[in-house]
Image: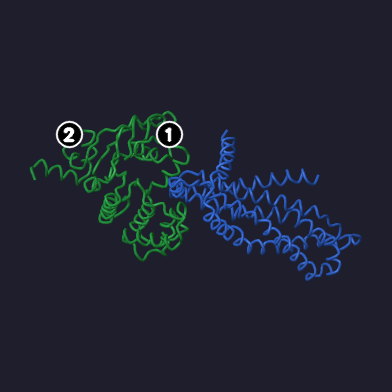
Amino acid sequence: MNYLHAIGEYFLMLKGVFGRMTKRSVLKDLIFKEIDDLILSSIGIVAFLSFFIGAVVAIQTALNLTNPLIPKSLVAYAARQSVILEFAPTFISIIMAGKVGSYITSSIGSMNVTEQIDALEVMGINSLNYLIFPKIIAMLAYPFVIAISMFLGIVGAYTAAVMGGFVGPEPFIEGLQDEFIPFHLVYAFIKTFLFAFILATIPAYHGYYMKGGALEVGEASTTSFVWTSVVIIITNYAVTQLLLS
Amino acid sequence: MIEVKGLHKKFDDEEVLKGIDFVFDRGKTNLIIGQSGSGKSVLMKCMLGLFMPEKGSIEYDGKSYHEFTEDEKKDLSKQIGMVFQGGALFDSMTVEENVMFPLRMFTRQKRKEMKSRVDEVLERVNLTGTANKMPSEISGGMQKRVSIARAIVNRPKYLFCDEPNSGLDPKTATVIDNLVQELTHEYDITTVIITHDMNSVLEIGEKIAFLKDGVLAWKGDKSQIFKTEDETVTDFVYSSDLFKKVRKAQLEGY
């Protein structure tokens, strides 16, 4: 029953987010601030993780290719498919649920416990729109982060595979281009957009509707990470079933 | 002027306000006092439109809040200034940005004009030189003054203060009380203050509503509160040592 209540409350929140709009000039500043806080500040960690994930995928694949009949270019093929289809969009989104999601929950939650949200409401400002709408718009730039992740994942795979002596540069490039299906990129970016919306709204819900003090802000951040991850995984399954099967 | 008529508010089965009738006068500091859980904050939140009462009405200058259209409610909220218990300053903004916030949201003034008004208000609350500081870099008393500055920057008709001097030392608390009273007279606004502090009652209680268990148990002003024999009021008022001494002095004819 509590879950149903929470789901209903979440959709009512979304209705409120797209309700009475904040003044355009203020909204513009908020969106730029959120792009800085949510997107630009995440690029460093995403780049670091992607490079090494790509490298590890390449090494693992190469070490498991013991049959001489299987071409070495399969290392690049496997790395490309893993990075584009799953590691970049899904794995990075789970990490972002921890980084960006916790930030959103704790920042809105802190505003909640210190009556800053009440202050907005008393001034006649639609606090849902003021706080959450700019985050949703800023997260439209999230596919840009995932594109960087895909690129660096493949660079990491190339570096590990070629520098590690598992495969030469030419077979690697050949494997990278082998049986490439452009729709896989479309699929990856469709789910990235969905994950971006989930990353902006579920943590915001947990921050906005939390009750209590500083301790509860911490609890809300943890709960928000768990639920954001769960919803991302379920959405990933549903989208994959719909678009690829 | 704000008039509350027969206000009832329930949470689940618990009736928190049981028919409050009171007039908050313009140009006066109107205090709501009472023990914790007596319904003071709920009354204020009903007046601010944050809670919807089950019965009764709240009239702003003769017009019931429930009859307001959405646009009128929006206009009303622009005429309200609110000082929260903890200040409720926006952590991510400087003092200047906090005070400028209502002007940015509700006016079409140029930045220069807004800055000039913010400087004027900060000077009025004795906070010159703090414009570029973050709320975390200033003391609790200064945060309250920033909150007051933010509340009055857009020249409101109504000022609401939820325990404006809680957590402050007595000297700073008196400064805040006097500042709120001066601003009330200066701008001729209707000020509503929730307080537990009997010093504030003594200093600025121009009109007082005493709430007990959701009922308006007594009303009067700071001079009458000493004279009342009503036990519900005296039990609360004379729980303060200061007031006990004042009462004793009165009885002894000083």
Q: Is mark 1 on a helix, strand or loop?
A: helix
- Where does label 2 land, which residue? B229
Q: Is B120 on the left-hand or right-hand side of B202?
A: right
From the viewer's perspective, is residue A152 above or below residue B58?
below
Closer to the eye: label 2 or 1: 1
Give chain B's shade: green
**Position of residue A168 measured from the top left corner of the image (x, y, whole percent):** 84, 69
Give chain A's shade: blue
- Where does label 1 land, which residue? B67
Residue at 80% across / 60% down in the picture? A61
**Position of residue B155 measured from the top left corner of the image (x, y, whole percent):** 36, 51
Residue closest to the eye, A66 or A116: A116
Residues at marks 2 and 1 on the same chain: yes
Residue at 62% across / 47% down in the picture? A228
Q: Which residue lies furthest to the right in this view?
A: A69
Chain holding disc 2:
B
The residue type indicated by label 2 comes to: Glu
Q: Is mark 2 on a helix, strand or loop?
A: loop
Chain holding disc 1:
B
Q: Is B37 on the left-hand or right-hand side of A192?
A: left
**Do the residues bearing badges 2 and 1 touch, measured as CB atoms within 8 Å?**
no
Residue closest to the eye, B185 or A187: B185
**Position of residue B254 measured from the top left corner of the image (x, y, whole percent):** 8, 45
The residue type indicated by label 1 comes to: Glu
**Position of residue B1 measured from the top left corner of the image (x, y, whole percent):** 31, 40
Residue closest to the eye, B37 or B163: B163
